[in-house]
Image (cartoon, grey):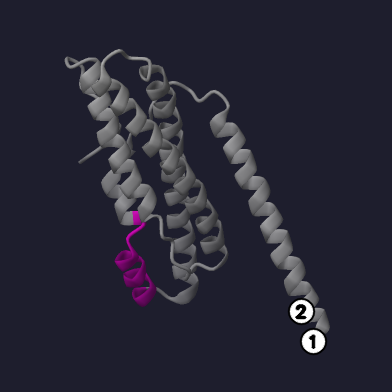
C-alpha cells in the first residue's frame, strides 16, 4: 500500500516538473522576439475541436480505446491552434506597443486595449496548454479552451480596429472564416 502511494506521488511530482519545464520554455520562446508575421487561424475548425458536445458525441459512439486515440489527436490539434493564437497575440502586442506613441488618442487607446487583450490571451493560452497536457493523460477530462477562442476573437476585433485607425485603406484580418 505504501509503495503504491509513493509511486503515485512520484508520478504526480514528475508530471508537475515536466509541465513546468514545458511551460517555462514555451514562455521563453514566445517572449523572445516573436516573428513579425501573423498566422491565420480557422476559427470554425478550432471551435469544432474544443466543442464539448462533439467530444461527448465521440465518447458515446466510439469504443474506449478508439475514443482515447481520437481525443488525443484532437487535443494535439487544439494545442497547435492555441500555440498559433499565443504567437499571434505576441506579434500584435509588439505592434500595439509601437502604436502607443501615436498622437491620436483613439489610436493610443486602441493600442492599449490590444495590448491588454493580447497579454490576457497569452496567459489563457498558457493555461489551456497545461490543461491539454493533463487531458492527454486523462482524455475524459474537459478541455476548457473556450477562453482562448473568445479571447482570440476579441483580440482580432481589437487588431482590426487599430489597423483601421492607423491605415484605413488596408484591411486587417488575423483569422480565417470559411
- The residue at 23%/28% (across/down) is 161
Q: In this image, 93 relative to 8: left or right?
A: left
Q: Residue 70's mark?
A: none
The crowding category of the residue bearing disc 1, from other C-alpha atoms within 10 Å (few below 14, some 14 to 19, many at least 20), is few
Tell me the chief SS of the magenta region. helix
Q: Is residue 42 visible?
A: no
Q: Which residue is mark 2?
A: 5
Instruction: Name the image quarter holding residue 93.
Output: top left
Q: Quadrant of the N terminus?
A: bottom right
Residue 59 rendering spot, x and y as whole percentages? 39, 73
- The residue at 31%/65% (across/down) is 54
Q: Nearer the viewer, residue 167 or 18?
A: 167
Instruction: Name the image quarter holding residue 51.
Output: bottom left
* Residue extending farthest right: 3
Q: Which residue is mark 1?
A: 1
Asked which secondary structure carries label 1, the reply is loop
Asked whether the residues under the numbered discs 1 and 2 touch, taking CB atoms below 8 Å apart as contact, a structural biologist would say yes
Asked which secondary structure carries label 2, the reply is helix
- The residue at 39%/21% (across/down) is 95
Residue 129 rendering spot, x and y as whole percentages? 51, 51
Q: Nearer the viewer, residue 48 or 168?
A: 168
Residue 10 rendering spot, x and y as whole percentages? 77, 67
* Residue extending farthest bottom: 1
Placement of 60 over or under 69, stated as above or below = below
Which residue range is magenta in the image?
Answer: 49-61
Amino acid at each position: 500500500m505504501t509503495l503504491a502511494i509513493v509511486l503515485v506521488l512520484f508520478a504526480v511530482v514528475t508530471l508537475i516538473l515536466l509541465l513546468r519545464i514545458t511551460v517555462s520554455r514555451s514562455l521563453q520562446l514566445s517572449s523572445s522576439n516573436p516573428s513579425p508575421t501573423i498566422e491565420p487561424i480557422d476559427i470554425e475548425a478550432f471551435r469544432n475541436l474544443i466543442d464539448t458536445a462533439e467530444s461527448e458525441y465521440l465518447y458515446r459512439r466510439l469504443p474506449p480505446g478508439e475514443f482515447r486515440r481520437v481525443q488525443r489527436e484532437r487535443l494535439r490539434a487544439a494545442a497547435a491552434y492555441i500555440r498559433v493564437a499565443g504567437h499571434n497575440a505576441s506579434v500584435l502586442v509588439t505592434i500595439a506597443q509601437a502604436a502607443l506613441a501615436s498622437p491620436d488618442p483613439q489610436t493610443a487607446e486602441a493600442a492599449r486595449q490590444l495590448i491588454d487583450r493580447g497579454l490576457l490571451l497569452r496567459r489563457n493560452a498558457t493555461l489551456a496548454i497545461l490543461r491539454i497536457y493533463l487531458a492527454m493523460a486523462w482524455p475524459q477530462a474537459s478541455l476548457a479552451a473556450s477562453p482562448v477562442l473568445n479571447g482570440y476573437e476579441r483580440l482580432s476585433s481589437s487588431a482590426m480596429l487599430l489597423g483601421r485607425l492607423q491605415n484605413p485603406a488596408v484591411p486587417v484580418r488575423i483569422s480565417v472564416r470559411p
